[in-house]
Amino acid sequence: MKFTEALREMKQGKKVKLPSWGGYWYWDKEKQTVMIQCRPQDSDQGDLLDIRETQRVEYTLKNVASDEWIIADETNCPVLGGEVTFSFGDAIKYVKRGLKLKRKGWNGKNQYIQLATGISYKDADGEIVNCEHDAIGNTAIAFVGTSGVQMGWLASQADMLADDWHFAD
């Protein structure tokens, strides 16, 4: 949903979030403002911030401009006891940012994907070749699994259509 609808939902007492968030936003009737409940870091309870006091204005405005707002509840919000999951489209966005991701549906433990950069290889003559290419660069998705690393991992259709992607520990 767009933020105008999310704000309307907050004013009706609901908590909202973006899909990847561990925390949520809500409307404080007394203060007449949006409050931000951040996800806890380690044993921390998580900060509670008034949106008017945000230190990262550009980040906050980009969030407001999003059309991906959802209702935060005990299934999708870690602060409320749930777990963050998202689509493959979001997974690709987070991989590009350097985060490690995996699917709930994958059987193997400690399997995840991540962005590989600075890719090079050894040719038949034993020379190292840097894959830098003007049009496509030299990055790829690497699948890290129990048997090692698979460079240039290709997602299956099941992976691409799944909504059980989440951050790897």
Image (cartoon, rainbow, N blue to C red):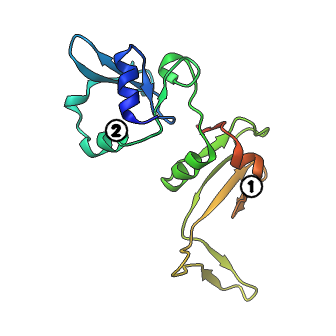
Q: Which residue is mark 1?
A: 148
Which kind of residue does numbered mark 1 sit on? Gly
Q: Quadrant of residue 126?
A: bottom right
Residue 28 in the figure: left or right of residue 77: left
Q: Residue at x 27, y 24 (%)?
A: 49
Q: Can residue 48 be seen by looking at this rendering?
A: no
Q: Can residue 22 be seen by looking at this rendering?
A: yes
Q: Which residue is mark 2?
A: 64
Compared to residue 35, the image places residue 86 above or below, namely below
Point out which mark residue 41 bears. Answer: none
Element type at mark 1:
strand
Which quadrant is the C terminus positioned in? top right
List x then y, in percent, for residue 144: 69, 52
Q: Residue at x 48, y 53 (%)?
A: 97
First in sequence: mark 2 vs mark 1: 2
List x then y, in percent, for residue 103: 69, 40
> Around disc 1, counting alpha carbons within 10 Å, would you say few (fewer than 14), some (14 to 19), or many (20 or more)?
few
Question: Which is nearer the eye, 72 or 131?
Answer: 72
Q: Residue at x 79, y 38 (%)?
A: 107
Compared to residue 121, the image places residue 78 above or below, namely above
Q: Quadrant of residue 101?
A: top right
Which kind of residue does numbered mark 2 sit on? Val
